[in-house]
Amino acid sequence: MGRLEGKVALVTGGARGMGAATARLFVAEGARVVIADILDAAGEALARELGPVARWQHHDVAREEDWDAAVRAARASFGGLDVVVNNAGIYQPAPLDGCEVALFERTARVNQLGVFLGMRAAVPAMRARGGGAIVNISSIAGLRGFPGAVAYVGTKWAVRGMTKTAAVELAADRIRVNSVHPGLIDTPMIAVNTPEANAAMVAATPLRRAGTAEEVARLVLFLASDEAAYITGAEVAIDGGWTA
């Protein structure tokens, strides 16, 4: 316990799924956490559950002003910002010849622009603390082609590339930047898939099951902690062997 003692973290998409699991684990490990999401009721309930070491912040990751407000909230409530987890994302399958421009643009605004804005907004606050850690949630769809989800795949590859560029640019500031690439994880997001598609994913996974939000949170915790002090620019799959 205490692997994030004294640290202040901001977790986007923090109201449910992997984000909520990450917020809970961070608090258990000593962090103070800003839970950021557009899901007000769920986010407020989680903040109440976690107590005074957590704060709810309504936050649209595609809005620059919301990022400014979230970073200000972290500094005002807890004194600074050490960790950002860019977890918020949307997923709506559509093949290349069936993907509307509106869907592509909406996916890009949340999944790609949101990560860019989050990294950029965090830098001044982390520099003021002498360093920090950014963990960007990508996907196995950011490691290989994935038919039937061109917009989602494109944004997750973009997250991977932006992570590596930021890691190199920010190393001198002692700000580490890594990406996490989950496979099939049992969260509300996979409900948009057909049961047959999810079953096929499980069958293709060497460990023969979906992962859990808590398992992803434990990897995020490691990358955010000082135990990963020499890891930056890495891409870490957590997929039961699916991309092996």
Image: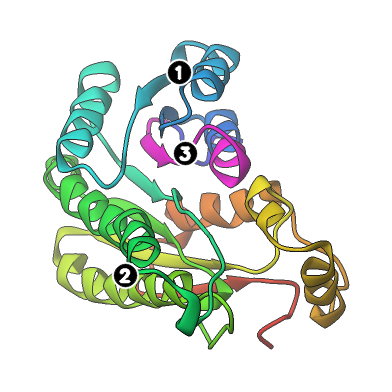
Residue named by callout 3: 4
Residue named by callout 1: 53
Which of the two discs, 2 and 3, labels the residue nearer the N terminus? 3
Q: Secondary structure at mark 3?
A: loop
- Numbered marks: total: 3
**Colouring used for the render:** rainbow
Q: Is 59 drawn above or below residue 49 in the view shown?
A: below
Q: Nearer the viewer, residue 229 or 125?
A: 125
**Label 2 to label 1: alpha-carbon separation:** 28 Å
Q: Amino acid at mark 1?
A: Val
Q: Is 231 on the left-hand or right-hand side of 16? A: left
Q: Mark 3, residues whose alpha carbon is within 10 Å: few (<14), some, or many (≥20)?
A: many
Residue named by callout 2: 163
Q: Amino acid at mark 3?
A: Leu
Q: Secondary structure at mark 2?
A: helix
- Quadrant containing the N terminus is top right
The image position of residue 158, as x and y in percent, is 33, 74
Q: Is 27 on the left-hand or right-hand side of 81? A: right
Which of the two discs, 3 and 1, labels the residue nearer the N terminus? 3
Q: Is residue 231 visible?
A: no
Q: Amino acid at mark 2?
A: Thr
Q: Secondary structure at mark 1?
A: helix
Which of the two discs, 2 and 1, labels the residue nearer the N terminus? 1
State which mark lies toward you, 2 or 3.
2
State which mark lies toward you, 2 or 1.
2
Q: Residue at x 42, y 40 (%)?
A: 11
Task: State the extent of the magenta-drawn residues as a range.
Answer: 6-22
